[in-house]
Amino acid sequence: MPDAVKVGFVPFSAAARGVLVVFCDDSLKLGAATAKVLGAAAATVKRAASASQFKGKNAAALDILAPEGLKATRLIVIGTGKVADLKDADILKFGGVLAGKITAGTDTVTVMAELPDGAMTPGQAASIATGVLLRAYKFDRYKTKKKDGDDTAVKAAVSIAVEDVAAAKKAFAPEAHIVDGVILARELVNEPPNVLFPAEFARRASELKKLGVVVEVLDVKAMAKLGMGALLGVSQGSTQPGRMVVMRWNGGRKGEQPVAFVGKGVTFDTGGISIKPSGSMEDMKGDMGGAACVVGLMHALAGRKAKCNVVGAIGIVENMPDGNAQRPGDIVTSMSGQTIEIINTDAEGRLVLADVLWYVKEKIKPKFMVDLATLTGAILVALGTEHAGLFSNNDELSERLYAVGQATGEKVWRLPMGPEYDKMMDSQFADMKNAGARNGGSITAAQFLQRFVGDTPWAHLDIAGTAMGAPKTEINQSWGSGYGVRLLDRLVADYYEAGK
């Protein structure tokens, strides 16, 4: 959790010093408790709104300095729009909006957790706190000098005034661990590749042991013994040896079949012999966004003591073009025994996932597998940065992922699969090739992966457009977004924990 931000819950009370944050609808209506706290200053809100053409639209904000009649030095009014139209994701967004309005050096912030039609529920108050913390995160540890305006992170004690303090604290307790998981994922994606190479990534994942997660790290020798020729082929050109990490959270009934999440972890991707253009190649430090999400997810689930057995497995490699690197034309043998002709060494993530998916299918035998990967540039062409691409062999799992995507704002969109696309991956020299034609690139990549999942219910999330470099939002100002942690935590919570 960001050290600069402290969030707590307090009872409704008279306006405090510092910054006061309140909410109004699109008619400028305030809640009863809010109006009581503001007193005569409520009239100031209407005058300021008229002067600035503030209409109370969803997530719009009105900033009033030195409001007359209040001890507060600033009054921030956040619009909710029509209260009847509010969704869970809106409340989370409001927390981010208010955090974005708090400038560096602010000491105290009091937030009236009341909508125009009454007090926020404990869950809504917790969402406000979550939005504040997600927005406040900033990655600047490598800056030794800062210019004026650089340090815009929230540095304040944020007190959220609620009707029931105990209930709000209880509602926020699991959310705090989810925030930590998202921020862990962001940290991993943001780290430079000379710091976060495969062995260091595995070491950081191993720190989950402190939360009760059972962690197993497989080195090159162990993976070679298992026959993971696809994964090892990618890493053979790097001086940094690859790793696979298997994380187990046993929060469900003993012996109960687990659910599984698999992540692609290419800590840097030059493209190998099929080298990428130099422009923006530095962004390829984020080609491990899928693995980062899985580690962050396991942190969140273990932190909040999820009542479910969960396995997270990540393949971690660096794809480099030295004299030992694999070549286009090489044929490798995967753990499944299937052979793969290398057409393009820059189609490396699917090779990593192939062996990890097969390992999880055979060794873990989960209820389902969801893999996440910054897999194809083609998914940005298809979906932009608003949705992750969803591919699946199971309608129920797909429908559940879509539903939790809508609820969390981490949206997915299902794309087609079928034999017509699958045959595009056939090779004349091996069982398959690792790259198809230019058209339908995200689909053919998913078809490749499907050859390693058998009959296990499976979904593939192509997060190349959402995990890194996506447009900044009310709850994320970071290059690495931590996409997928909240999505998959909600999937587990809504459908797979004990009692569901």
Image: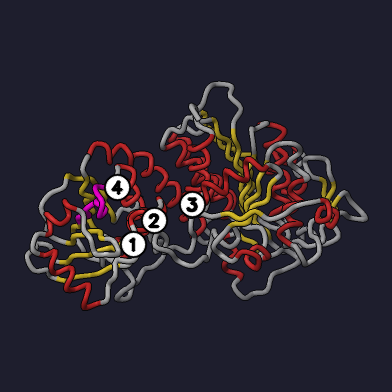
All told, the count of numbered labels is 4
Question: Between tags 4 and 1, which lies in front?
Answer: 1
Region rendered in magenta: 110-119
Do the residues bearing badges 2 and 3 touch, measured as CB atoms within 8 Å?
no
Q: Is residue 96 magenta?
A: no
Q: First in sequence: mark 4 or mark 3?
A: 4
Amino acid on which disc 1 is placed: Gly
Q: Residues within 10 Å of mark 4 (few under 14, many from 20)?
A: many
Amino acid on which disc 4 is placed: Ala
Q: Which residue is mark 2?
A: 85
Q: Which residue is mark 3?
A: 185
For the residue pair 386 and 279, the one nearer the viewer reads as 386
On residue 125, the disc is: 4
Residue at the extreme top? 254
How far separated are the C-alphas under marks 4 and 1?
18 Å
On residue 81, the disc is: 1
